[in-house]
Amino acid sequence: QSALTQPASVSGSPGQSITISCTGTSSDVGGYKYVSWYQQHPGKAPKLMIYEVTNRPSGVSNRFSGSKSGNTASLTISGLQAEDESNYYCSSYTTSSTLIFGGGTKLTVL
Amino acid sequence: QVQLQESGPGLVKPSETLSLSCTVSGGSMSSYYWAWIRQPPGKGLEWIGYIYSTVSTTYHPSLKSRVTISVDTSKNQFSLRLSSVTAADTAVYYCARDSSRGYGDFDYWGQGTLVTVSS
């Protein structure tokens, strides 16, 4: 199974909004509501930010939101803050009952 | 508060078997899926597989022939064995709890342990 496709990098200025895309196929992203997003600071374990496409775990800022259209899921971060600078990964359930991650996106806050 | 902690050798020789354990504290292992995920240095995350209860496992297709995940609920531990390792298996290995019955909502993670494959 090939990794989901994410842009290698995105950037934005403090206060702006950015969107990270995650493109798969009808066998994964497009076929299920089970897309998650993770934030990973260097040297740290990933942190769950969004699950089941749009849901935020308790304690995650409402500046983080998720959506999906067809085979592409998106993570939007509004009101960018310096601490949002990190690596972000999407994941999806697949028709093979397996899980697949995206290649990761490095977010730079200018 | 649920906590996960990986343990095992940090160095494994090529062709040998990598063995790691994950100890779960602060909560029961029942009713959850438990996963292993790895990350080669400087690269992205790769799901290895998960286990539910003591007998239900699912593995990454490309690793399936070399991977075994098992659980010992009496010790609150689950384990990973990866056979015939090569340098490509060098990675930080994470254990994680899936709160969504195997659909990929990993809400608790271990800190990760670096395993290097080298002679």
Image: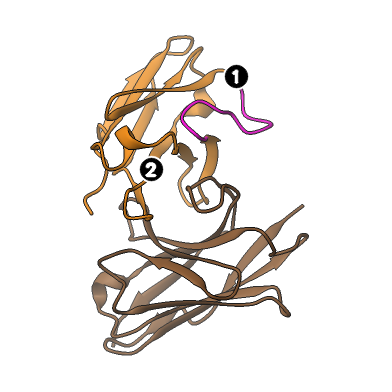
- Apparent colour of chain A: orange
Q: Is residue B14 left or right of residue A43?
A: left
Quadrant hosting residue B92:
bottom left
Q: Is the magenta stretch mostly helix, strand or loop?
A: loop
Residue drawn where x is 39% and y is 40% of the image: A89
Q: Specify whether residue B115 is painted magenta.
A: no
Question: Which quadrant, please, contains the C terminus of chain A?
Answer: top left
Which residue was labeled with disc 2? A92
* Amino acid found under the numbered disc labelled 1: Asn
Q: Where residue A87 sits: x, y (%)? A: 40, 38
Placement of B38 over or under A76, stated as above or below = below
- Name the foreground residue: B85 vs B63: B63
* Element on which disc 1 rests: loop
Placement of A18 over or under A107, stated as above or below = above
Q: Where residue A43 sits: x, y (%)? A: 48, 52
Question: Which quadrant, please, contains the N terminus of chain A?
Answer: bottom left
Which residue was labeled with disc 1? A62
Q: Earlier in the sequence, mark 2 or mark 1?
A: 1
For residue B104, which numbered disc appears in the image? none
Q: Nearer the viewer, mark 2 or mark 1?
A: 2
Q: Is residue B41 left or right of residue A64?
A: left
The CA span between labels 2 and 1 is 22 Å
- Name the foreground residue: A51 vs B46: A51
Quick one: which chain is brown?
Answer: B
